[in-house]
Image (cartoon, rainbow, N blue to C red):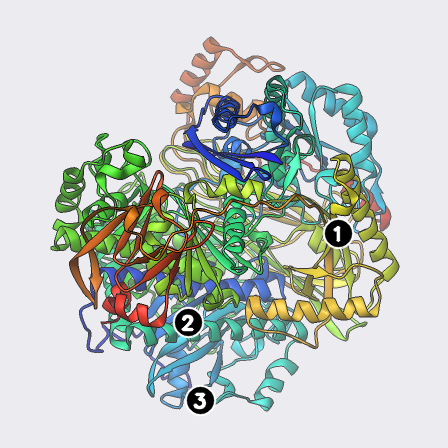
Amino acid sequence: MKRVGVDVGGTFTDLIYVDDEAGVIRVHKLPTTPGDPSQGTIQGIEEVTSGAGESPSALDQVFHGTTIATNIVIEHSGATVGMITTEGYRDILHIARHKKPLNFSNYQDLPWQRYPVVRRRYRLTVPERVTKDGSVLVPLDEEAAREQVRKLKEAGVDAVAVCFLFSFVNDAHEARVAEIVREEFPEAFLSVSSEVLPQYREYERFSTVCLNAYIGPKVATYVSRLQDELTRLGVRTGVHLMTSASGVATAQAAVDRPVNLLMSGPVAGVVGGIWAGKHAGYGNVITLDVGGTSADIGLAQEGRLRMKHLLDTKVGPYQAMIPMVDVDTIGAGGGSIAYVDQGGIFRVGPRSAGAVPGPAAYNRGGTEATATDALVNLGWLSPEAFLGGGMELDAGLARKAFAEGPAAALGMSVEEASMGAAQILTHSMVQSIEENSVRKGYDPRDFALVAEGGAGPLFAAQIALEVGTPTVIVPPYPGIAAAMGLLATDMVYEYVATTYQRLSKLDASALQRRFEELEELAVRQLADDGIDPENVVVQRIADCRYLGQGYELRVDAPSGQIGPQWAEKVRADFHDIHEREYSRRFEDSDIEIPNVRVRGIGLMPPLRTPEIEHGDESPDAALRHEGSAWFRVAGELRDVPTRYYERAALKAGNRLVGPAIVTQYDSTTVIPPGLAAHVDRFGNIVIAISADSAEMASGATEEIAA
Amino acid sequence: MSVTEYEVGRQPGLPTRKRVEVDPITLRVLGGAFHAIAKEMAGVLFRMSYSSIIRESEDLGAGIFDAEGRELCESDSTPMHIGSLPWYIRGFLHRLGDEIEPGDVIVHNHPYLGASHSPDVAVAVPIFSGGELLGFAAVTAHVLDVGGSFPGINADAFDVYAEAKLYNGLRWYRRGELNVDVDRMIFDNVRTETMNRGDMNAMLAACQLGCERFLRLVERYGVEVVMSAAYDWMDYSERMLRAEIAKIPDGTYGPVVGWLDDDARNRGVQLRVETRVIVEGDEVTIDLTGSNPEVPTGYNVPFEGSLLVSCYYAIRTILLDETTFPEHVPQNDGVFRPVKVIAPKGTIFNPTFPRACFSRFCQTQRVVDNTILALAEALPDKVTAGNSAGIHFCAYAGFDESIGEYWLYLEVNEGSYGGRQGKDAMDSVDNLMANTRNNPIEELDQRFPMRCDQYELRPEPAAPGKWRGGVGIIRRNRFLVDGTYSCEGDRQTDPPKAIFGGWDGLVASCRKNPDTAEEEYLPAKVTGIPFRAGEFIEFREPNAAGYGDPLERDPAQVREDVLDDFTTIELARDAYGVVFADERTLEIDPAATEAKRAELLAGRDGRSLTEYFRDRLIPSNAPVSIAGNREFGIEPA
């Protein structure tokens, strides 16, 4: 099978081409075309396939990750949306949860008021009200609805969202208004709450459904343009798009429910990290993807992704109640600015120098000290080898930025201040990893750390020493982990329904019916996508909470007949999950299932990469030069003789002894003193972090403890 | 044990523990770690708790404190809880002295010994290292019921014994063992045992987690380094705040005088809140001398746990605004140090034992609002026009025979902010120290025998100003079974004050069965009012005041306001002097607008939205209300 994964990021479009049969793998990077990202995407596909001596028409799969949906929201550049909602509740979107983002600020903006997804003038109401049990308190006034739809049409909105209270119990009113919209205003993009998200909590549902309408028209345009271009290139299969739920969906499914594309960006990186871990023989991984401005951190046990808590599924400042992979993003990257604030505190990030002016060493006018400059000062980044020599770094400017900035302010040497900046940055990543592992009941000693992104492999060994993961894996192409992740994913659709069931008084047949309805949706969708039934997997999830609690946790539920055994299994698993999440369990409490979910998975052929050439222990053939770099050794900052290797020249079986620095086109791996690594048969650099090595490297940990 | 000997407001002074030098990198690392611990404690608490007042509203606080109650860190939850825990700790230390042992779990809510008010119960776990009591991991949270005279809220309680069961440094657990009799005493004497138990278990879990996390830091970095770093961070926050205070010219600002509606019993008698802000060098004093004598009801303010907190909040928020101030300054003991508070004994802000002080929130909000207004001339780019600075905090309750317990729903009805320099105000949001989350309607209707029949912005427009004031909400809730309603609220008589030529805001109102034959206006503070099944309540929360002269507002922006119903065509003309040539297309008539503005400029004095809408609230009869009335046979007006 010949396939392409193409991930469009803010700066670069990354591609990977794989030919499973021929054992060929090619990677490619080109600048993103912000005006119309489909341009760069198409150009990249042409270039990467022709580089492999193929034409796009030979491709069996094109999997695509895009931030287009997220960017529309963050840049406030979506469609003009009109909303039809229940009379008496016009401002649910304006009030939100009546909580401010910041406690100590009279000058903050409430994003949902400052940049409303639907302006108040386009939020029109109609008489209707369904109660909690689905009965009709106020019948729908169809004429009023028709009148309001006409008003929206006359006002020139692009999209219409229909959002009524309790429509997840009884969708008749919403369905009828949807019909009216189709009759009166067929050209509008239509987003109906009971179709998009039949789940309780009105603000979160309305917000999600209106976001769906807000991004819908642009996403549809983008996807169809991309489809057309691919057809022109002769690509026989359509494009598939990455969703926030960690799988891909067909172009049609993505256009029908574009909200699922939101925040899919960092997910592919985590999936890529999981795949890289599995490939190297590790099922439990913590993934660390560090770029220029931010670091994404994910965790997977036995290759399974974790999903975010309901309160945390946001897109920028807006609530979106969609399944999202639990990825933690923090403002720490190569461009993070290092400075001493007016109170004398040494800070690194979250402010970033970005790509322009960028770090001082880029010589593009930046004068503030950044993490990248620190690494140049320490000798970890080689000025001449940056981006494969495509861009020369100016070491003098990096030095000057620190000498005049934090080093002067703290009365330290440039090297001390640079190491300090690296440690502070490292620490913020350590803290995020701890929040996502130890603090959720996962023992980091059972995990491998997968280092991705341009800067992940620079920090990974030091982080592993502090967190306690015994292994670091640097995959062969750390800079395009997300594109790799696209090819390692399956097709995934998730459906949800609100049920309000209790385990002690389970209405088994009703629950069974609800699951079966959702399962049918999932199976039908996958069949429509042309997935062979033998490759279809259907999973059940029960959102559970102790009766009386307000927030639920996801519990994988058994398939098959629902009865006492089913309930017992869910009960036992929920107690365990609750205990891991909150370190307490309440065996006496009844358990409530407010929602059930079904995940339909279409299995994709597994991604395999070819083995690299085998060599012996000595990596000397890859040695490019010997120099020196600054490390902490036994607590002391020292200039240590260091070997610099070229990644592409490494062979399987090579053993690298720190201090060693491995450079490749878009990433650099640091193996600190006292640690050693080997290259496995797939070209992964596997760094062993033993207790002994921790002692030898000691580095920051010891220093801080002193 | 007598509490009268307790010395109110006594600060422990600066820490005396020997300090070591902490390098800047470790300092930064530990600062991040402290904040993460507090945040994690709060996260555990609200996600696993039972009552909606904690889990949805996040009416809670969490943090780590030293052995004398100095705050190392606090969670970003509801600011009213921030800064109160130090006083809880000093309060229970008064009772327990050195009797505290590892494994103890302390419960405290005594309002004359540091508590914010009696329903805000604190749970604290001592942190011991090497036999030394280093400090406490502690949380406060608003529990549904504390066994006062009426379910949930007791604004007119006779004395502090009537408002709640008092927990004065009770050891719920001793040396790790449940103190069974104390446990029974606590939970047998509240109306909502199951919920209180669930919530207090969550509080305990949060404290244990905080203790564990803090000890891990101690283990890793050493006790001297950790405690020294904690004190260094306090010094940092203090330094940052002092630097900002020093920028304000020395002098006395104010007095600003505001009026509270009544004391919950003596109707029509307003209560005076007088506020001066005195700046001397890098210190600031908030002086409430001249404020009302204490009242015979529960409408007094605990000095330590509530008044001090509101003053710290006011100064920190004005001077270190998280949006405009470039650095994140952590919330700890340091930000309390430069702020002094004067409230004479025997006033509502420093009541005498055993006066009840259950309901104190609206008064403290007015202190914050007055402080902001007092500083308006000095700091025009840091203040807002007058805020709603009040809430209608209500308790809906009834007895559920099927479970043999009360059902009890606490609700915060939010207000709005005043206009501010360069931007319009925030609408329909928790104001100032309040920062709770509302309960979803689809959760409320499902969980309680109630139905929300309306929830949106109130129909009256925003208070005019160059930068308009915020709009409050209208909300209607209907009882579906017989029950009782209690409320502590305010701001039904004294509107939010404008600054720099804006309009004063619009007061709140509260009606039982509005727009029916049985309509009845209710005061903001009532206790145990019976509601029959089908009866309903309506709140209209204040529209806060405008900032700056409305005649300076761009007519095009006024047109936008009309399109979004933030103002009306009439008010566009009467307040902004904007005249439309065509009221359908809203085309502006420039000549008529110029003439109207000139006319207004000539003959105009301060205007108030409350005056403008005097006795003529805009009717709001959503079809859901009408259908509900029909359902329960309530006659139309």
Q: Is disc 1 placed on a helix, strand or loop?
A: strand
Residue farthest toward the top in the current orientation of the protein: B591
Q: Is residue A585 above or below residue A594?
A: below
- Circle 1 crowding by C-alpha within 10 Å: few under 14, some 14–19, many from 20: some
Query: The disc labelled 3 sits on which kind of residue?
Result: Met
Q: Are marks 3 and 1 in contact (CB under 8 Å)?
A: no
Q: Return the mark for residue B213.
A: 2
Q: Position of residue B280 (x, y in %)?
A: 19, 55
Q: Is residue B138 visible?
A: yes
Nearest the viewer among B58 and B287 is B58
Nearest the viewer among A430 and A281 is A281
- Tell me the subunit letter for badge 3: B
- Tell me the subunit letter for badge 2: B
Query: The disc labelled 1 sits on which kind of residue?
Result: Thr
- Horizontally, is A79 left or right of B87 in the view? right
Q: Is residue A92 above or below residue A467?
A: above
* Sequence-first tag of 3 and 2: 3
Q: Return the mark for residue B1.
A: 3
Nearest the viewer among B219 and B573 is B219
The alpha-carbon separation of the residues under discs 3 and 2 comes to 35 Å
To which quarter of the image does residue B401 belong? Answer: bottom right
Task: Give the residue number, with chain letter if any, for mark 1.
Answer: A498
- Circle 3 crowding by C-alpha within 10 Å: few under 14, some 14–19, many from 20: few
> Image quadrant for the N terminus of chain B?
bottom left
Q: Position of residue B264 (x, y in %)?
A: 56, 62
